[in-house]
Each structure stands twice: as structure tokens, then as C-alpha cells.
Image (spheres, rainbow, N blue to C red):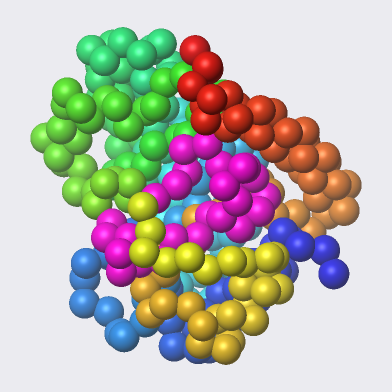
Amino acid sequence: MRDYTKQQYRKIVFALTRHGYQCDALINYGVTHSNKAAFLRHDVDKMPQNALDFARLEHEMGISASYYFRIVPQSFNPKIIKEIASLGHEIGYHYEDMDLCSGDLDKAYASFQKNLAKLREIAPIQTICMHGSPLSKYDNRDLWKKYDYRELGIVGEPYFDIDYSKVFYLTDTGRKWNSMDASIRDKVASSFHIEIRNTKHLIQLICEGKLPDQVMINTHPQRWNDNLLLWTRELFCQTIKNQGKKIVVRWWRGGVLW
């Protein structure tokens, strides 16, 4: 069975809800939940139509999630953003202004404010999430070393405002679950060390009650395709990209990059 299809994602959500997890958007982190909660985060790096498919699937299953859109053309689609918001999902800004402004803090902050306002013309924005920009030397989170996003009416950023000693973080970055080699910046200081081989294994762990009561699952919808041609293209492109990431990781560990 092919992994990373929309049907596989449906099975993840079904397993979570069947086994007592309340699936929710990040904006509701900290709100009183049942004993189990799964916060669903989607980073829309490209192919927003896939994000809309996810949003419709979740709406049909009676749950809400968070969708973080970049401002670049391959992600930013006002019509799709509006429709996803109309389905009861949270919209957030997937910011990369440090990268776009070559590390200039002041220019990056001005850019962030401009892009945030542009998104807020379409939907309410209360949380943000950095884009990893894996091949860039700039970490977009560095913007907050000088500025405070809360002054702009932002109540949360998952890399700063989630307690990962209590929340198990899962990401499909690199088309692998929590792969250290495939992830450059999409990492958190976690108290949990649970190996997940593939999506089938993830679903098995959910069904066997072997995941913590609080989880956050981060997916990139462009990676999840039922169409064989799109699925194969994504697999090929991500395999090549992962090889480049491995080189970057080795250089970083050797302290010789940039």
C-alpha cells in the first residue's frame, strides 16, 4: 500500500477520533480538552488545492485544523484560503520574512507586518508558524529576537508557545516521520522519543494506545496524493531534496556551512 496518500491521512484522523483524541486547531491549544487531544497543523508550502482537499476531508469528519499559508505565489491563493476558513478551520501565516529580506531584521519586520495585513484581509490570523527555508542560512524565528509578535495581535507560534514536554510532536518533513536527516529546522526539544517507521506504523501506535495523550501532527498537504502520477513526482522530488538536506546537515555539524 502506498504511503502519503489522502486516504492514508483519513485513516490517521479516523484512528485518532476512534481512540479518544479530540482533534483541534492550534488556536485552541491551552483550551480545556478531553483527556486526549491531537492538534492538527498543515503547512501549505505549495499546491493549495491539496490543502483544500484536506480541509474538506476534515470538515466531513467533524474536526477543525490549522492551515499555515506562505505569501509566495505557489502557496498564497485567496479563494482557497477563504474556502478553508469557511469550513471552520484556522488560517495562519507561514512566515519566511527573514529569508525574503536576506536577514535584515528591520526590513523583515516591515515585510511581516505587510504580509500579515494582506492575509488578514482574507481571514482572521491569530497564530503564525515559521517556514523552515531549509536551504537558507537565515532562521525566520530570529525575527523575534528583536520584535514581539504579540504586539501585532498574534497569540501563538508553535515553536515558542507549545510545551513539548507534554505534547508529542510529529512532522512529515522530508516525507518521513520525525526524520532527523530530512529536517533542518522543523525540530523541537521533546521529552518523547518514539520511532515511527511509516504511516501504517503511526496508525498502529494510535490504535494500541502507545502515543502520549497530547500530540501535534504537522503535515504538508502537497506530499499526500492519491493520484499516482502526482504521488510519484512528489516521491522523486522529495528524495532528491532529502539528499541535499543530508549534505546541509553534515556541513552544519562540521561547522563549515556559511
Instruction: Give the magenta part as a residue range.
Output: 162-188
Query: Residue placed at 22% from the left, 30% from the top?
Result: 144
Q: Residue at x 39, y 32 (%)?
A: 95
Figure quadrant of residue 34: bottom left
Residue 12 is a magenta residue = no
On screen, residue 108 versus residue 229, left or right, reads left
> Can you tell which quarter of the image residue 162 is in?
bottom left
Q: Which quarter of the rendering shows the N terminus?
A: bottom right
Query: In the rendered image, is residue 85 in sight?
Result: no
Residue at the limit of the structure toward the left, as seen here:
151
Q: Which residue is more in the foreground, 88 or 115?
A: 115
Q: Is residue 187 left or right of residue 144?
A: right
x and y percentages locating residue 36 in the rendered image: 36, 82
Q: Nearer the viewer, residue 30 or 250?
A: 250
Residue 115 appears at what percent x and percent y?
Answer: 34, 26
User: Which percent across, then down, holds residue 16?
Assistant: 52, 80
Res 209 visible:
yes
At 48% from the left edge and 65% from the top edge, which residue is drawn?
193
Q: Is residue 35 left or right of residue 136?
A: left
Q: Position of residue 104 (x, y in %)?
A: 31, 10
Q: Is residue 178 magenta?
A: yes
Residue drawn at 47 percent across, 43 percent down: 186
Q: How many numbered discs, if any?
A: 0
Q: Main secondary structure of the magenta part?
A: loop
